[in-house]
Image (cartoon, rainbow, N blue to C red):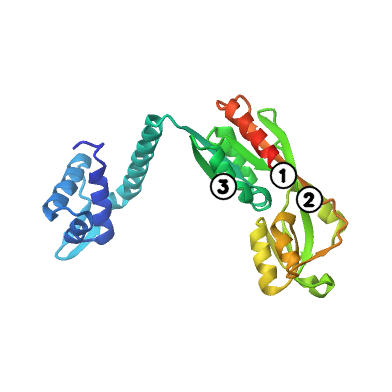
Amino acid sequence: MNIMDIRVFKTFLQVAKTKHFGHAAENLFITQAAVSARIKQLEEFYDSTLFIRDKNNLKLTPAGETLIAHANLMIEQMEQSKQSIALAKQQKIKFDIAATPNIWDAFLSSRINKSIAFFQQVSLGMEISARETIQRKLDERTLDIGLLTDPIKNTDFNNVLIGYFELALVSTSKDYHDLIEQYVFVDWGLTFQKEHTLHHKFQPALRTTTAMIALEVILLEGGFAYLPIELITPLVESKELFIIDSPLLIKRPIYLVTRANSNNNKLLANYKDFLQTMQ
């Protein structure tokens, strides 16, 4: 058997899913004989029986159960390699950006279309991740840029302050004291947490890292939360939300964080300048 023939593994997974050679053949648009031949190839290669055939009842053997994870991994790796080769043929650079949920809601989501246009000749990846995940991926060099509200204090990383976003304490009522038990705490970073503890004694009904979750909750149930001004301005204008005076310093920084000695220094510098122009 040619182990690089991914069709054999796809056939195995289809039989395991349908528990029927005929149904697997129909789903794969091949003959039942072809399905049987591919399963036989696998069993000969691994020198193991993969299915127990008992009349119309088809069951995986322990060897078959074990092979499922490996078959899925094999297919995934082959698909990824095809994508990588396709990108190489197109001579496109792969470039990945991640932002914490708060940066995404407050800053990046409204600039996503312009970012895509900026990276026209690049295979762009974007994701929302926790700070710890972003740091790990930067360290592993599987990520090019992380956007955070707090820098990573490590000499292996470069932190560049590219701008700020502003928060406002907003409520569904002009007097937020009526909603004191409906406060939603949004995590806007380490500095915000310290200032919040210093100035407020609110007991949150809900904690979240995502502004959109907080916004949906207070609009549905009533309440108040610290939310990005860009996000809530239309709702303030329509008087669905009201801005409340706050003792907190509510301008939050945006740090563009990269791994030191990155391979894409020129593109990183250009994107940094691009983001700064959109402040």
Q: Callout 3 environment at 10 Å: few (<14), some (14 to 19), or many (20+)?
A: few
Can residue 61 be seen here?
A: no
Q: Amino acid at mark 2?
A: Phe
Q: Is residue 20 left or right of residue 224?
A: left
Instruction: State the image quarter where residue 131 is shown.
Output: top right
Counting from the top left corner in percent of width and height, residue 266 is at 59, 26
Quadrant holding the C terminus? top right
Write the residue at 65% across / 57% down: 210
**Mark 1 lies on residue:** 149
Mark sitting on residue 192: 2
| Secondary structure under the numbered disc 1 in the rendered image | loop
Say whether disc 1 or disc 3 marks the residue closer to the N-terminus: 3
Counting from the top left corner in percent of width and height, residue 60 is at 26, 56
Q: Callout 1 environment at 10 Å: few (<14), some (14 to 19), or many (20+)?
A: many
Say whether disc 2 or disc 1 marks the residue closer to the N-terminus: 1
The outermost residue toward the left is: 33
Counting from the top left corner in percent of width and height, residue 198 is at 86, 54
Kindly indicate whether the residue at mark 3 contacts the one at mark 1 (C-beta within 8 angstroms).
no
236 versus 7 height, above or below: below
Write the residue at 63% across / 33% down: 258
Q: Amino acid at mark 3?
A: Asn
| Secondary structure under the numbered disc 2 in the rendered image | helix
Closer-to-camera residue (96/136):
96
Mark sitting on residue 113: 3
Kindly indicate whether the residue at mark 1 contacts the one at mark 2 (C-beta within 8 angstroms).
yes
| Camera-side mark, 2 or 3 | 3
Instruction: State the image quarter where residue 186 is shown.
Output: bottom right
Say whether disc 2 or disc 3 marks the residue closer to the N-terminus: 3
| Secondary structure under the numbered disc 3 in the rendered image | helix
Write the residue at 19% across / 45% down: 43
Can residue 122 be seen here?
A: yes
Q: Is residue 24 left or right of residue 139?
A: left
